[in-house]
Amino acid sequence: MRSLVHLARRFSRGADGSPRRRVREILLWLGIGVLLWLPVAALVYGAWEASGVTLRVGQIADRTIKAPYTATFESQLLTRQARQEAYDDARNVVLVRDPSVETAQLEALNRLLTQIETIRAQRGTDLAAATQQAQAALEGLSAEDAQLLVSLSDASWGRIEGEARRVLAAVLAQDVRSDNVAQVKEQLPERVSLELTAVERRLVVVLVRPFVRPNVRVDEEATRAAREAAAEAVPPVMVTVQEGQAIVRDGDPVTPEALEKLEYFGLLSPRESWPEFLGLLGLLALWAAAFVLALYRSLQHTRQVRQLLLIVGLVVVTVLAGRLVLTIPEFRYAFPVAGTVMLLAVLLDFRTATLASWFLGLALGMLDDFSLLTTLVAGFAGLAGAAVVWRAERTMTFLWGGLAVAAVTAGAALAGLLALGRTVVDAQLAGMVLLQSAINGVLSASLCFLSFSLLGRLLGITTHLQLLELAHPTQPLLARLAREAPGTYHHSLVVGNLAEAAAEAVGADPLLTRVAVLYHDIGKVLHPELYVENQANRVNVHEMLDPVTSARLIKEHVTEGVKLAKRARLPKPIVDIIQQHHGTTLIKYFYAKAQERGIPVDEQEFRYPGPRPQSREAAIVMLADSVEAAARAAAQAGKLYDPNDPQATSRRLAEIVDRVIRERLDDGQLDDSDLTLRQISEIRQVFLALLEGVYHPRVEYPEVVREPASVPLDERAAAEA
């Protein structure tokens, strides 16, 4: 409960106790959250409003719908139709012949012919009775045909009898299926020999027709296997639709093919219900709130409105573009979301880029039908690119960043597809993923490289490449410093080594620290003779000045340095370090000198104007500057070395470093710098290691005495000339 009260009080009042400042800060972060959520919510609403396209086969379309892009895809409808046609093909039917049918039917015909032959033998006694018997012997035989069969001559009957046997045998020698029995019977007159009379041919057909039966049957298992094989052999039917091609026109009936195309392009879907729409908006609101909270905690010590606007602008643009591109299968893995993350890493820092990477992936995944794969691919790819380029010091680094994005995108996409198991990852799909991943890497690296310099200059953000350019000795201010104040320039180089190593040890920006050190005493070029490091073989001008004037002149190197830096358009972080590297420390030498002379002393007149260091880099520069100056002064005074004590140098350097750090802590100079005591301890260890390497005792080389030359030096020089 107490922690909640403390948190509420802290939230209601600023660090300086000003409620107005806290209110302004709250309004700022609320505005950032609204800027994040509102454009994405508008996009979701537009997509929801346009999603209410519902059509059915046969329905008359009330609008003309065109393809949004060119695509080639497998038509499930046409493929299914083609495979059904192949399945139903009559050639796939497997028949099995039954030889017993032919034998049985020929025997039945023979029995009939024998019976008719017996009846014909009785025709002389009673023709009418014989005719009736013939009709009874063959079902369906007309009285006229029965009388003809009974009354024919023996020669004619013999021809009919033989031809009937031959025709039936010929018919049953072929495959007769149940579905073509009627067709075979109709073709019987064509099989009868033309040597017979018309009446004889007709009677042959009458006798044979009842005995024509199917002599083959369908093998169901073999037929089904043949049909399935034929259907599987049909390749997928691919359909190509050009961008802008009308899929369905206003006033035309909707065909199944058109309906399938509309579904493929995502143009045909029922509008989501209000609860689903509001639920998505609620999740996006939580996403925006969580992102703002993460940014607040991450940037609470370096919070700038321009940086926040940069983050929000890049994230919103990326989410809006991703919502439109990720729905296209051909570009799903080619969308350069990692380019935004890499840009934030170069312009800001790796921590902010990491936050943006996963929050971007989360937003894109929610908008892509809650796709976990989209979230993972975007998150891992952005993280890989940011890890490579966040401290880019060469243009080649961006190439490696693009390769990292391509490799991680391909790996995450293929692994995700295999893990989800929703599709078969064949060679074609793997090739498409690899190609899209390569395009993603190229686009991400190119967008980051082409835009970071412009955005950095517009927003006043210093990049590492810009710092490397400023560190070159040919820069006008550095060249002037080396030429007009060589002692100060050498001092800056030594301090730079100390500060860079310390910054790297505590996780600060070592490059910014080193470059800032090169410029931290740039104000001394206006009057280099006022500073002891530039007074070699010169009279110390401060011996002729009163301590108050000397302190005022010494302090001016800070204010004048700030003016020179701004005139040279140096980045703001460097200007800030120039202004803060002495903080509000006391110029103790002249302060003590004024006290010795009995001059009325106002301590503020002997303090630097400040402000105190506001960043870790500025605090490190202050400590390194003070430690180096103190160690150099002790070395020049001969206080570091003791020929009788080999450990004296290390011990006295440790005392100097500890004294300087303790004085800065006691004076409150490090209170605003965000340095922890543990980090200060690490800085101390780094300073000691480097200073011991610089000021270690050296062996005194003996002087070699040579015999004087026989020929005087001036005579030898004249002879050589």
Image (spheres, rainbow, N blue to C red):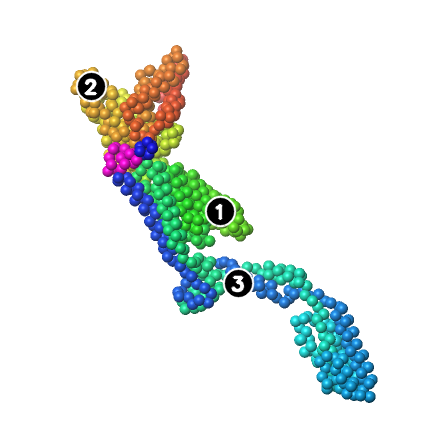
From the viewer's perspective, is residue 157 above or below residue 433? below
Mark 2 belongs to which amino acid? Ala
Residue in the picture at 52% in, 51% down? 423
Earlier-in-chain disc, 3 versus 2: 3
The secondary structure that most of the magenta stretch takes on is: helix
Q: Secondary structure at mark 3?
A: helix
Span shown in magenta: 8-22
From the viewer's perspective, is residue 79 above or below residue 115? above
- The Cα–Cα distance between marks 3 and 2, rounded to whole angstroms, is 100 Å
Q: Position of residue 308 (x, y in %)?
A: 32, 42
Q: Position of residue 145 (x, y in %)?
A: 73, 85
Residue in the picture at 32% in, 28% down? 619
Q: Secondary structure at mark 2?
A: helix
Mark 3 belongs to which amino acid? Leu
Earlier-in-chain disc, 3 versus 1: 3
Q: Which residue is mark 2?
A: 594
Mark 1 belongs to which amino acid? Ala
Quadrant assignment, res 195 = bottom right
Quadrant assignment, res 294 = top left
Q: Secondary structure at mark 1?
A: helix
Q: Which residue is mark 3?
A: 78
Residue 294 visible here: yes
Image quarter (top left, top right, bottom left or bottom right) of the C terminus: top left
675 horizontally vs 262: left or right: left
Q: In the image, which is nearer the foreground, mark 1 or mark 2?
A: 1
Q: Which residue is mark 1?
A: 413
Residue 708: say if magenta.
no
